[in-house]
Image: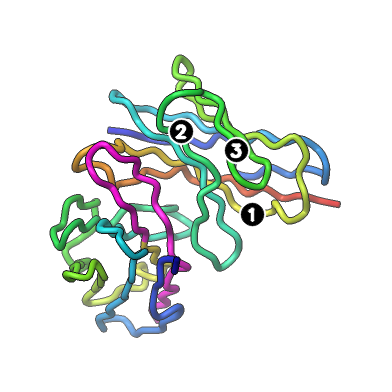
Amino acid sequence: AQSVTQLDSQVPVFEEAPVELRCNYSSSVSVYLFWYVQYPNQGLQLLLKYLSGSTLVKGINGFEAEFNKSQTSFHLRKPSVHISDTAEYFCAVSRGIGNQGGKLIFGQGTELSVKP
Amino acid sequence: KAGVTQTPRYLIKTRGQQVTLSCSPISGHRSVSWYQQTPGQGLQFLFEYFSETQRNKGNFPGRFSGRQFSNSRSEMNVSTLELGDSALYLCASSLSMPGMNTEAFFGQGTRLTVV
């Protein structure tokens, strides 16, 4: 079975500072990895995904993440955050193949709070 | 291209009643998944439908059920509502075919409040 741990429940940061949101996963099989963002009273929006290939993945809004297989991590980074980045961020995994393709396992979420 | 559409956006129901939520996926997407989001339990997978068949099921009681129609639209039903069923219910659609990525696109959700 897969599981996802987001190591920080809340991350406060000042505007224009860099940020890293940490995610570790556990799985005995190859997985696909995702980061989603959720603004208040909204659904989830995909930031980026790792399916295969280059371990450094670039997403929308200036976010990027690095897949580290040996450490089973997929940390999300942004070099300079804006007030508008304030939201909740979710890391997720899926088997990605066959009949398990449609099931996402989510971490508990990290609340990013950007202060002026 | 229209996104995933969930209706209604908000619902208030009384304990013991039943409720039906609707989800229209992105055109061409054949997989529809449902998730429950609560402050205590986070995002939990309910079930997935693919080509009108339930392909995956999460760990929820039988009061939670769903179905998918031939046009890929999906409904989920919760019977005998309990206070603990109050949550944001999210629907996601994807192509999710063997050999293809499983990028899921989410709707805005239905906020269900049980009183």
Residue identified by numbered label 3: A8
Real-space Cα distance between discs 3 and 1? Answer: 14 Å
Residue A4 drawn in magenta: no
Q: Give the range drawn in magenta.
A: B92-115
Name the amino acid type tagged 2.
Tyr
Q: Name the residue under label 1.
A: A87
Q: Do labels 2 and 3 share a chain?
A: yes
**Which dot marks residue A16?**
none
In the image, what residue occupies the spot 39% across and 38% down? Answer: A93
Residue B98 on the magenta segment: yes
Chain where mark 3 sits: A
Q: Nearer the viewer, mark 2 or mark 1?
A: 2
Residue at mark 2: A50
Q: Mark 1 lies on which chain?
A: A
Few, some or many residues within 10 Å of mark 3 (<14, 14–19, 20+): some
Specify whether B83 is left or right of A21.
Answer: left
Amino acid bearing label 3: Asp
Instruction: Say which quarter of the image contains residue B7.
Output: bottom left
- Look at the numbered disc 1 and give the secondary structure of its residue: strand
Element at label 2: strand
The quarter of the picture where the N terminus of chain A appears is top left
Mark toward the start of the polypeptide (2 vs 3): 3
Q: Which of marks 3 and 1 is nearer the N terminus?
A: 3
Residue B94: image x %, image y %? 33, 53
* Horizontal side of residue B73 vs B13, given as left or right: left
Q: Residue furthest right?
A: A116
Q: Are marks 3 and 1 on the same chain?
A: yes
Which x, y percent locates residue A43? 49, 62
